Amino acid sequence: MRDSFVGPFTIIKLIVKNAVEVKLTEEPSRKHPVFPVTMVKPYFQTEEDKFPSRKKNPTPPDIVEVEDSPGPVSKIIKARKIRLNTKHQTQYLVRFKNQTADKDKLLAEDAIPDGNLHLRRFRASRRTEQSHLLLAFFRGRVCQPVTAKIP
């Protein structure tokens, strides 16, 4: 992709009311130096030059996060898969001991304290939840009564 505008170039003269001649430098110097005024726009060196009446806001201080450890992990509640920088990553919603639900945090697998133990428990609980699905058989267009569970 190319830049929309290149320059800045100095305007030498106004040829007619809708064309200007500019002093080209370096690579574009081989081009014809006359351009329509619709292709010319004013050049401002800084934002202060462009907007002199604008008040400059002071920069806010850097935010320093204090890592307060909420304590040991009570359980992992949910998992979600996200895409971070073209890589898929699983985040886990973690509840900490003696903390309320508003203190739950989404953490990556390697950021969970005692992660292996809690992840094994979480994955095992999800397997047992999924095994309680009921089977329904269709014969013709009528649903037959449920008679079996998945072991």
Image: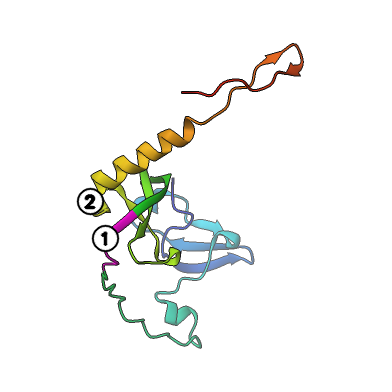
> Which residue is at the front of the view, 18 or 104?
104
Label count reads 2
The residues colored magenta run 69-74
Left or right, residue 1 beside residue 20? left
Q: Position of residue 18 (x, y in %)?
A: 63, 63
Residue located beneath label 2 in the image: 114
Colour option used: rainbow
On whether residue 118 falls in the magenta region, the answer is no
User: SS class of the residue under badge 2?
Assistant: loop
Q: Position of residue 140 (x, y in %)?
A: 75, 11
Work out whether residue 87 can be spotted: no
Q: Position of residue 58 (x, y in %)?
A: 38, 85
Q: Is residue 130 above or below residue 29?
A: above
Q: Is residue 138 above or below residue 88?
A: above
Packing grade of label 2 (10 A; few <14, some 14-19, many >=20) is few
> Which residue is at the front of the view, 97 or 82?
97
> Which residue is at the front of the view, 60 or 70?
70
The kind of secondary structure the magenta stretch mainly shows is loop
Residue located beneath label 1 in the image: 72
Q: Amino acid at mark 1?
A: Pro
Q: Amino acid at mark 2?
A: Asp
> Which residue is at the front of the view, 148 or 71?
148
Work out whether residue 142 can be spotted: yes
Q: Are marks 2 and 1 in contact (CB under 8 Å)?
A: yes
